[in-house]
Image (cartoon, rainbow, N blue to C red):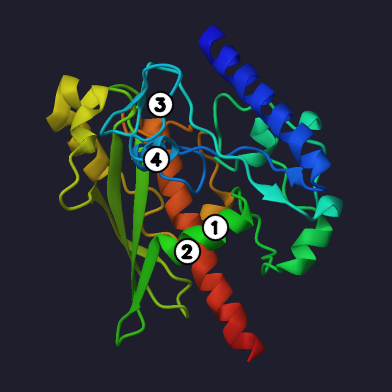
Amino acid sequence: MFASSVVEHLIALAGAGLCAWADGERMAVLPHHSPGYSQWDVAEQGRLLRLIRRDGAVALPGALEALDSGALRPKKSQLAVFGITRHLDRVARLADLVPCQQCSLPNCPYRRTPYLRARPRLEQDSPVPQSTAPYSINVKALKRWAAERLVLETREDGTLHARFRYDGTTCTNLGCPLAFHYDVDLGTRQDGYPIRGQNCTPAPGETGHASMCQYITDAPGLMAAIGREKPLAGRPLGDVLGWQRSEAAAGCYCDAASREHKWGLVLETIHYALHDSESHADNR
């Protein structure tokens, strides 16, 4: 915890120095972003480090190594990128911001303040369709996941198949990346999209799940638990909106609460994608 505080302090000092320079250029410095944050794969650490070093042309003050998993050595090290803008009327003072306000990672156990969404003026610049459904997840996140992680297939009889790719990391072994495929079979729209089939398996070629602590302890037991868990099976997809489930942000699959939480993310994303497409169809 102390090391994390020191790193955060050093980043704040770097940001303050950049702000002092930007003020003289009539620009503003944006909150920093790092691999591992929302929308930036931690596996990009190595590429970013090479870019900072300019492929060896620039020497750093100390030894720093990016591991294949994306973790940095020494532990608690952090690479940070600060954006710069001339739109001074659209930004808040960097000194007034808390890093958590710029991170949309859902249910983070270390969160100190709520995620700060874009102000109304910015949302008007880039409108996002807002659903009236009571999702437990930020609608912008659902929209992004629906576009980037979800594939929907409509069959000839009107039933559907959905595949969602979940990318996370283990909680041990320096945060090894892992990926799982969620396959969901749904009935027709007229029947209320009943959930007829559910399956969760490691993505083809993915080996990170073998680094989970529970897998190392009892691989058959863990994989059997993942395979038999089919929440809301037989019920309408819309029931996910009233499903009271655990708030578990761990990226791994070691405990039932984390697995239940991920199924909630998957089903809400599917519901959003179908609701959004129906809204567009009704408006045509």
Indicate the position of residue 179 as horizontal and vertical percent values. 29, 46
Q: Say what secondary structure mark 2 lies in.
A: helix
Tell me which amino acid carries mark 2: Ala
Q: Where is residue 232 in the image (x, y as percent from the top left)?
A: 41, 52
* Discs 3/2, front: 3
Tag 3: amino acid:
Ala
In this view, the residue in front, 136 or 179, is 179
Distance from Cα at disc 2 to Cα at disc 4: 36 Å
With 146 as the anchor, is 82 left or right in this view?
right
Image quarter for residue 134? bottom right
Q: Does 247 sit above or below residue 265?
A: above
**Rendered location of residue 109, percent (x, y):** 55, 25
**Is residue 209 or residue 76 the one in the foreground?**
76
Q: How far apart are marks 4 and 1 (CA)?
A: 36 Å
Q: Which mark is residue 54?
A: 4
Q: Is mark 3 on a helix, strand or loop?
A: loop
- Where does the image place residue 29, in percent across and percent down from the top left? 72, 41
Q: Name the residue under label 1.
A: 142
The image quarter in which residue 207 lies: top left
On residue 146, the disc is 2
Residue that badge 3 annotates: 59
Along the viewing direction, whichever of 36 and 219 lies nearer the viewer: 36
Q: Where does the C terminus fall, quadrant-wise?
A: bottom right
Q: Of helix, strand and loop, which one carries label 4?
A: loop
Q: Are marks 3 and 1 in contact (CB under 8 Å)?
A: no
Label 3 to label 1, Cα distance in Å?
Answer: 41 Å
Residue type beneath disc 1: Leu
Question: For this view, does 144 lie left or right of residue 88?
Answer: left
Q: How crowded is mark 4: few (under 14 residues within 10 Å), some or many (20 or more)?
A: few
Q: Which residue corresponds to the image point at 56% horizontal and 18% vertical from the top-left? A: 7
Residue under the image location 55 percent in, 7 percent down: 2
